[in-house]
Image (cartoon, grey):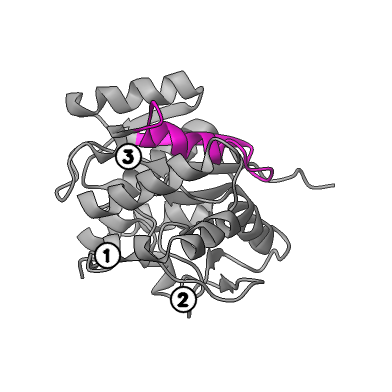
Amino acid sequence: MAARPKVVCITQARTTSTRLPRKVLLEVSGRPLLRHHLDRLQACRRVDQVVLATTVNATDDPVVEIGRQAGVLVARGSEDDVLSRFVLAAELSAADVVVRVTSDCPLIDPGLIDLAVEALLEDDAVDYAHLDMAQFPRGLDVEVVRRRLLDQADGDPATTAAEREHVTPYIYNRPQRYRLKSVPSSFEPASGRWCVDEPRDFELVRRMLEALLPDKPHFTWRDCVALMAQHPDWARLNQQVIQKELKQ
């Protein structure tokens, strides 16, 4: 019987984000956003290990400390070549399957991560699975990829700078080479912006975390949807924030 593949969730974090520097260190309810994020990743049932991939810059030493306090493996690599950083993290953790998430998503749902992992593992022919983000609020983004694809992207001399910075475009822009799978929602599609790129995003996420954590420390994305329905005015806090486009 073949060994069960090791599933490793790798999240990328740094303090030099341009629109809201040091955003992962901002605190809500006495904890930095990054720790909220890592705690939720560690609640995944289908993830064997969590790795925090940050940079070698001294400015990211606080990120490393938060990772160590959370008990996750920390990998340090290039600031701009994030693909190589993920390849390093996958090597250090001996990953067979990599879950890619980003640390500006403190409301990320462990159940949705498990769902995406299962979508890949249940079919050996699937190379890459992702949530259909047309049906989910921004900030729940999850990608699952077989490690060999990351190695192929890293070793291809034709890989562009944008593909190296954003890790997965090399894969999902080649549907003729790789089998891709989109994971839909089993509920009515929901919209919103629950990631943190700008101060207005942080204000919304702060309110959501402070409202949810006292009574529901293991809240789901559906709890977030219900909360936003109770406070429809909150959506206006960051509705004018424009999602940063990927470099081409």
Q: Looking at the picture, how far across and down is residue 148, in whole percent?
A: 51, 53
- Asked if residue 16 is positioned above or below residue 198 in the image, the reply reads above
124 or 138: which is nearer to us? 138
Looking at numbered disc 2 in the image, what kind of residue is underneath it?
Ala
Which one is closest to the eye, mark 1 or mark 3?
3
| Residue 135 visible within the image | yes
Looking at numbered disc 1 in the image, what kind of residue is underneath it?
Ala
Q: Looking at the picture, how far across and down is residue 172, in whole percent?
A: 43, 70
Q: Is residue 66 left or right of residue 160?
A: right
Looking at numbered disc 3 in the image, what kind of residue is underneath it?
Ala
Element class at badge 3: loop
**Whole-Å distance between the Cαs marked 1 and 2?**
30 Å
Q: Looking at the picture, how far across and down is residue 237, in whole percent?
A: 28, 60
Residue linked to disc 3 = 13
156 or 233: which is nearer to us? 233
Q: Is residue 143 left or right of residue 198?
A: right
Residue linked to disc 1 = 158
Element class at badge 2: loop
Question: Which span of residues is magenta-colored?
Answer: 28-53
- Asked if residue 110 is positioned above or below residue 33 in the image, the reply reads below
Q: Is residue 23 left or right of residue 119?
A: left
Which one is closest to the eye, mark 1 or mark 2?
2
Residue linked to disc 2 = 134
